[in-house]
Amino acid sequence: MIHIRPLSGDQSVPMDLLLLADPSKEKVLTYVQSGSCYVAYHEQDVIGVYVLLSLSQQTVEIINVAVKESWQGKGIGKQLIRHAIAEAKAAGFHTVEIGTGNSSIQQLALYQKCGFRMISIDHDFFLKHYDEPIFENGIQCMDMVRLSLTLQAD
Ligand code: COA
């Protein structure tokens, strides 16, 4: 049983988890300041995190989602994405976006299983914005695949 809650003001951000999804500490520090950070707990342990960042009045982005390595593959990532969608809807947004690398096969599967559709590709995003080359699943991560989910009013 896990609990997902907004990070309270006196808690530090789970940087080790956030860095699993984004290797740039500088970028993470920038968006956690302007976004809303939610944390998944198992008892007292922080086992997952996501960050919502509004892009406009209509659209919010899940800018980071990560699950502690020893907890991956147990459905926590899906719970975090579903929680983020529910929070976005409750806050009155119309669309949720998420971006991931062309090489992030598992993430592309997860987001589509949660209802996201591919909308665009930001070519060379990871070549332009990250100093070190990134490889996953034997594929170089070069392009950002952008996905979106339209929220239906009840
Ligand atoms: N093909 C098809 N489905 C796949 C798959 C593949 N290659 N790899 C994973 N999946 C599916 C799983 O089967 C599961 O679907 P199901 O519930 O229908 O079986 C779904 O993806 C999600 O699994 P879940 O256990 O909820 O994911 P998780 O808890 O391991 O969290 C991440 C997923 C990506 C958040 C986690 O692996 C992580 O923290 N990775 C490092 C950080 C990261 O890359 N973040 C995203 C940045 S874009």
Image (spheres, rainbow, N blue to C red):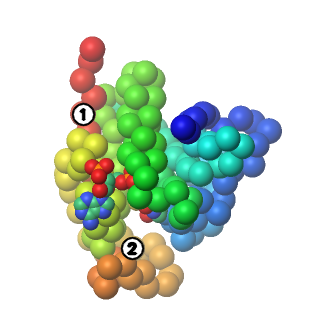
Q: Write the residue at 64% across / 63% down.
A: 16
Q: Is residue 153 left or right of residue 70?
A: left
Q: Write the residue at 49% across / 41% down.
A: 52
Q: Secondary structure at mark 1?
A: strand
Q: CA distance from mark 2 to mark 1?
A: 26 Å
Q: Quadrant of the C terminus?
A: top left
Circle 1 residue:
150
Q: Amino acid at mark 2?
A: Phe
Judge: label 2 CB < 8 Å from ligand 1. no
Q: Farthest residue to the top: give it.
A: 154
Between residue 76 and residue 149, name the one nearer to us.
76
Q: Is residue 87 left or right of residue 13?
A: left
Q: Farthest residue to the front: give it.
A: 1
Judge: label 1 CB < 8 Å from ligand 1. no
- In the figure, 147 relative to 37: above or below? below
Q: Residues within 10 Å of mark 1 (few under 14, many from 20)?
A: some
Q: Write the residue at 45% across / 29% down.
A: 87
Task: Give the x, y percent position of residue 68.
Answer: 56, 59
Circle 2 residue:
126
Give the total of numbered labels. Answer: 2
> Which dot, 2 or 1, sits closer to the camera?
1
If the picture is divided into quarters, which one holds ligand 1? bottom left
Q: Secondary structure at mark 2?
A: helix
Q: Amino acid at mark 1?
A: Thr
